[in-house]
Image (cartoon, helix red, strand yellow):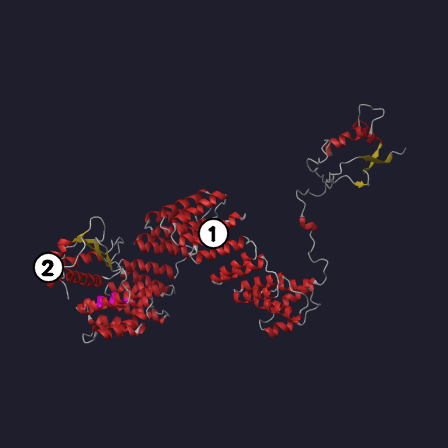
């Protein structure tokens, strides 16, 4: 035979029918009754010798075919008797091109094909969709471009164009065009694509209109349809509509998906329907739904808003029970929720757990922790956290810096705030902005540091940083306490000229400065500023100062001013008006204003009565208003004593502890007034900022001193 001989081995052997795996290096041709393995190979004479050695058998003279194939079957084919036996492992391929480096992973890009490779019209439709996106938003312009469509519109082409349109207005126009021309029956998918586009534009009314249209035309609303409707209603703050469509979804028998569950839970939370949210959550768990971290973030936020500490603990227990690992977002929500629930210790523990889990806190995390520490008045912990931020180079933004500054302002940490402010100036990305300067002005204003406040104001002018209305309010309060009226007028005029629009809080600050002015000329300067901001309030001040003003006129003008004032500024206005009367020795008018304030609900918690104790709470009053309230209360008690009516054993007055080091000292001023009246109230040993007196001492004092001690 020739040196190079081609040998064809036609090999017949039975292969189990259940074995569907194939060796990628052997070609198998199947026959009806059995399977034939044809192996084609080229061999030389020398290779035949090697083959003889390879295919040794117990009978070398006439080896059987199974004996010859035994080495092959032991390496590539299963030899077990199990009819379901398969290859234990995939044979390793051999790289046969030594001129190129071996690829460790075959590139999928090599065999990638365009999804629309068999549709030659796709490129034209892409260009046409781009042309529609670039057209004007007017319906006429859009329709004129639509008339240039290159091919007849089929179902597939319409879906392609509908999915390619970006603005929701054009998606809606094209969908209406499809409905008008009635080219093919509309299916659920067309409505879903259109609704999703409308959801980006927050067009809930249009989405609901399409949904009702589907119901009328008996087009099925699937899970995606309901999810789109519910999530759009949530984004548009139409929470009742979201609940309505969710209930309709349940009536149809459709089960919500993860997105729908999370959305409706958030809706229940915003509506304050805690029980409904928990019922839905438990119902979803029972149906096999596994919540994700977003769900628990929503639940934690819901409990945090209501200050429900037990609810926050429930969320933590559920996460641990289901093996859901909190992410940064969930930790942020939990920390904020525990802070609102009044559990700063737990918030700190969660923060430490987050760090131990390997998470790096982001700006929202740190801001939430700082707010918790500030609310709990944990100044030491807050400043230690700031040092840790700097050493670990954790991310900091304007909100975090300004939150730290505001915390320093609330706690009276002037030196710490100055170091933090200088740190901001040295930062490349978080240089002080208008709110940063406002926080510093608040700190200097609360501390009465008028010189530093004015230097900061001048620095803002040099750096072209506008003073906002809050900063202007803080600066005016500071200058008013320092009796620097000329500087106050200059700051106010400059601020108004630069676009600051005075609000009711700023007007209240000017009104409080009027009550502090000892000179009529200074009061006139401040009132001239107030005239530019609120002329009706100035008219009321002048009416209050006139002794000829009768009570009905005062009541009418007071009602008009208070009605046009924001709620948060109404009580400060009344307090300042009473202070002005006290400074002008108009005590009778001060009592009339206190009565009007009580009558219109500005002092709802002033008096408390139980069988054992009557109390007066003046914590929300100014010094003048608190003294007026004390006089009014003692006058009422005198009438009870004179009529021999039943009185409780204990009387108390609460001014607050004044823990802030910049506190105006209401407790001290109240104590001084009590001493001046020689009333039998003494500091409570059990409660700071409280004054107490027993019935016997108060009755004796009333009977002996009330005619001269209390104003009528």
Element on which disc 1 rests = helix
Q: Give the range drawn in magenta.
A: 573-580
Q: Could you tell whether 703 is left or right of 104 in the image?
A: left
> What label sits on residue 279 in the rendered view?
1
Residue 338: in sight, yes or no?
yes
Foreground residue among 535 and 345: 345
Please tell me which residue is depicted at 11% across the width and 57% down the height of the picture.
Answer: 701
Quadrant, the N terminus: top right
**Does the magenta stretch mainly form a helix, a strand or a loop?**
helix
Expressed as whole percent of the image width and height from the top left, the position of residue 336 reads: 41, 52
- Secondary element at tag 2: helix
Q: Where is residue 598 in the image (x, y as percent from the top left)?
A: 25, 65
Residue 529: x and y in percent read 29, 72
Above or below, 507 relative to 370: below
Q: Is residue 390 visible in the rendered structure shown here?
A: no
Of the pair 619 and 428, the residue shown nearer to us: 619
Of residue 182 and residue 489, the one placed in the foreground of this image is 182
The spot of residue 434 in percent (x, y) is 38, 62
Residue 703 is labelled as 2
Is 695 included in the stretch rendered in magenta?
no
Drawn side of residue 174 relative to residue 440, left or right: right
199 over 310 or under it: above or below: below
Q: Residues within 10 Å of mark 2 (few under 14, many from 20)?
A: few
Left or right of 485, for residue 635: left
Q: Is 577 within the magenta?
A: yes
- Decide: few, some or many residues near mark 1? Use Cα within 10 Å; few <14, some 14-19, many ≥20: few
């Amino acid at each position: 035979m020739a040196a190079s001989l081609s040998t064809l081995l036609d090999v017949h052997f039975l292969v189990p029918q259940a074995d569907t795996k194939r060796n990628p290096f052997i070609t198998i041709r199947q026959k009806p009754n059995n399977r034939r393995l044809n192996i084609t190979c080229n061999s030389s004479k020398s290779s035949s010798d090697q083959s003889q050695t390879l295919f040794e058998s117990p009978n070398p003279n006439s080896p059987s075919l199974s004996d010859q194939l035994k080495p092959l079957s032991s390496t590539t084919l299963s030899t077990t008797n199990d009819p379901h036996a398969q290859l234990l492992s995939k044979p390793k391929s051999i790289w046969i091109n030594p001129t190129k480096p071996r690829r460790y992973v075959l590139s999928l890009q090599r065999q990638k094909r365009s999804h629309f490779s068999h549709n030659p019209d796709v490129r034209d439709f892409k260009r046409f969709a781009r042309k529609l996106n670039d057209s004007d938003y007017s319906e006429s312009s859009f329709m004129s471009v639509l008339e240039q469509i290159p091919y007849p519109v089929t179902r597939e082409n319409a879906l392609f164009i509908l999915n390619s349109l970006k603005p929701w207005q054009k998606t809606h126009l094209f969908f209406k065009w499809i409905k008008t021309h009635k080219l093919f029956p509309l299916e659920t998918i067309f409505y879903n694509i259109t609704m999703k586009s409308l959801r980006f534009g927050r067009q809930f009314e249009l989405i609901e209109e399409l949904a009702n249209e589907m119901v009328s035309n008996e087009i099925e609303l699937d899970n995606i349809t309901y999810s789109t409707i519910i999530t759009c209603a949530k984004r548009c703050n139409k929470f009742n509509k979201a609940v309505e469509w969710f209930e309709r979804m349940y009536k149809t028998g459709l089960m919500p998906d993860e997105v729908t569950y999370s959305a409706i839970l958030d809706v229940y939370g915003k509506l304050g329907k805690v029980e409904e949210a928990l019922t839905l959550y438990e119902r979803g768990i029972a149906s096999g739904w596994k919540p994700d971290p977003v769900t628990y973030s929503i639940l934690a936020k819901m409990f945090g808003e209501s200050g429900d500490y037990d609810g926050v603990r429930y969320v933590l227990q559920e996460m641990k029970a289901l093996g859901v690992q909190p992410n940064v977002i969930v930790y942020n929500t939990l920390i904020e929720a525990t802070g609102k629930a009044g559990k700063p210790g737990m918030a700190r523990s969660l923060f430490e757990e987050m760090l131990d889990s390997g998470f790096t806190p982001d700006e929202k995390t740190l801001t939430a922790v700082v707010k918790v520490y500030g609310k709990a008045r944990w100044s030491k912990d807050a400043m230690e956290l700031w040092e840790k931020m700097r050493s670990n180079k954790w991310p900091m933004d304007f909100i975090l810096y300004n939150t730290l500054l505001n915390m320093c302002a609330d706690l009276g940490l002037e030196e710490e705030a100055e170091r933090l402010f200088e740190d901001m100036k040295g930062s490349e990305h978080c240089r002080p902005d208008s709110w940063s300067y406002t926080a510093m002005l608040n700190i200097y204003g609360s501390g009465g540091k008028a010189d530093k406040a004015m230097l900061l104001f001048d620095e803002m002018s040099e750096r072209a940083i506008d003073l906002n209305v809050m900063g202007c309010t803080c600066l005016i309060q500071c200058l008013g306490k320092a009796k620097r009226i000329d500087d106050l007028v200059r700051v106010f005029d400059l601020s108004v000229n630069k676009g600051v629009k005075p609000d009711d809080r700023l007007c209240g600050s000017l009104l409080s400065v009027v009550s502090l002015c000892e000179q009529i000329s200074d009061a006139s300067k401040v009132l001239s500023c107030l005239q530019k901001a609120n002329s009706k309030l100035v008219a009321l001040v002048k009416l209050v100062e006139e002794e000829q003003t009768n009570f009905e006129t005062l009541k009418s003008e007071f009602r008009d001013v208070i009605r046009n004032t924001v709620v948060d500024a109404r009580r400060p206005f009344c307090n300042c008006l009473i202070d002005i009367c006290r400074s002008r020795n108009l005590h009778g008018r001060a009592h009339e204003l206190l009565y009007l304030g009580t009558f219109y609900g500005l002092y709802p918690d002033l008096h408390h009565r139980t069988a054992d104790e009557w109390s007066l709470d003046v914590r929300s009053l100014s010094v003048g208003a608190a003294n007026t309230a004390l006089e009014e209360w003692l006058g009422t008690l005198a009438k009870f004593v004179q009529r021999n009516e039943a009185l409780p054993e204990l009387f108390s007055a609460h001014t607050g502890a004044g823990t802030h080091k910049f506190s105006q000292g209401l407790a001290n001023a109240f104590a001084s007034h009590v001493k001046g009246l020689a009333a039998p109230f003494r500091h409570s040993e059990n409660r700071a900022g409280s004054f107490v007196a027993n019935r016997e001492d108060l009755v004796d004092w009333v009977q002996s001193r009330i005619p001269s001690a209390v104003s009528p």
